[in-house]
Amino acid sequence: MSTTLPHTVMEQLFLNARTHSHWQNRPVADETLRQLFDLLKQCPTSANCSPARFVFVKSAEAKAKLKPCLMEGNVEKTLAAPVCVIVAQDMRFHEHLPKLFPHADAKSWFEGNDAAIAATAARNSSLQGAYLILAARALGLDCGPMSGFDNAALDQAFFPDGRFKSNFLINLGYGEADKLYPRSPRFDFEEACRIL
Ligand SMILES: Cc1cc2nc3c(=O)[nH]c(=O)nc-3n(C[C@H](O)[C@H](O)[C@H](O)COP(=O)(O)O)c2cc1C
């Protein structure tokens, strides 16, 4: 039965979790990346469309390909991170809907509707990137999400056939907590929420 999780879990997932830029010299096993995907893939997307595709950039060769696409301020931390995940979106995700949403003809909702494809891919791949961050934290990893890069250059380097488009990047590893800046303020409930 579902229940409110212990406070220590809330601390690890939300309250103490931070965006990291400095990384311990500790690798992330491929098996951990598989565990990460097996968690995040269970989280919801519209019509179960699951448009995100994840490229785990680990090798020196793949990092070298990524480097020229990064904003200058994101280069050092990304090269130092054990893994940088490219969160991309499959711009033909609807072709998989007969498998992923078999009880309806959901593929036909998108055929010939590029605006619906683009909005659905962006919305749901962003959600899946956020799920990845929480799954990573649940596995004891730290994250550093980034949108400071040249999407077109990255897409040319990693997805030259045009089917996949980058959304954002997430550095992954074990962070160096003593190098964090103080946490920036957040809105109070009254500033950001209304109960109607
Ligand atoms: C989608 C996204 C894009 C971001 N882009 C960058 C970036 O390009 N470079 C960077 O240094 N930080 C980037 N950040 C980090 C944010 O500034 C950071 O997550 C935010 O200030 C909260 O920090 P905290 O988690 O430590 O509280 C990005 C975060 C997100 C979620």
Image (cartoon, helix red, strand yellow):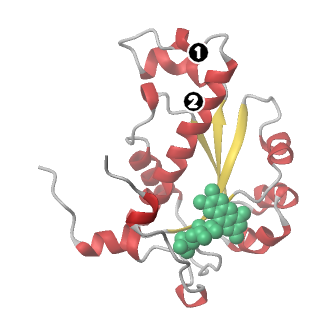
Furthest-left residue in view?
1
Kindly identify which residue carries mark 1.
110
Q: Where residue 184 sits: x, y (%)?
A: 56, 78
Could you tell me if residue 15 is visible in this image? yes
Q: Where residue 7 sits: x, y (%)?
A: 25, 73
Name the residue at 54% across, 8% down. Answer: 108
Residue 94 against residue 129 in the figure, above or below? above
How many other residues sit within 10 Å of disc 1, few (<14), some (14-19) or many (≥20)? some
User: What kind of element bears circle 1?
Assistant: helix
Q: Give the amino acid type for the residue marked by disc 1 in the picture.
A: Phe
Kindly identify which residue carries mark 2.
120
Q: Where residue 139 sits: x, y (%)?
A: 40, 64
161 or 151, nearer to the observer:
151
Residue 7 against residue 162 in the figure, above or below? below
How many other residues sit within 10 Å of disc 2, few (<14), some (14-19) or many (≥20)? many
Name the residue at 53% across, 57% down. Answer: 30
Name the residue at 53% across, 85% down. Answer: 177
User: What kind of element bears circle 2?
Assistant: helix
Is the CB–ligand 1 distance for label 1 below 8 Å? no
Res 161 → quadrant: top right
Residue 124 against residue 176 in the figure, above or below? above
Say if mark 2 contacts mark 1, CB within 8 Å.
yes
Judge left or right: residue 62 versus residue 3: right
Is the CB–ligand 1 distance for label 2 below 8 Å? no
Q: Where residue 16 sits: x, y (%)?
A: 42, 77
**Mark found first going from the N terminus, 2 or 1:** 1
Could you tell me if residue 92 is visible in this image? no
Q: Which numbered tag is attached to residue 163?
A: none
Furthest-front residue in view?
196
Q: Quadrant of ligand 1?
A: bottom right
Q: Give the amino acid type for the residue marked by disc 2 in the picture.
A: Thr
Res 72 → quadrant: bottom right
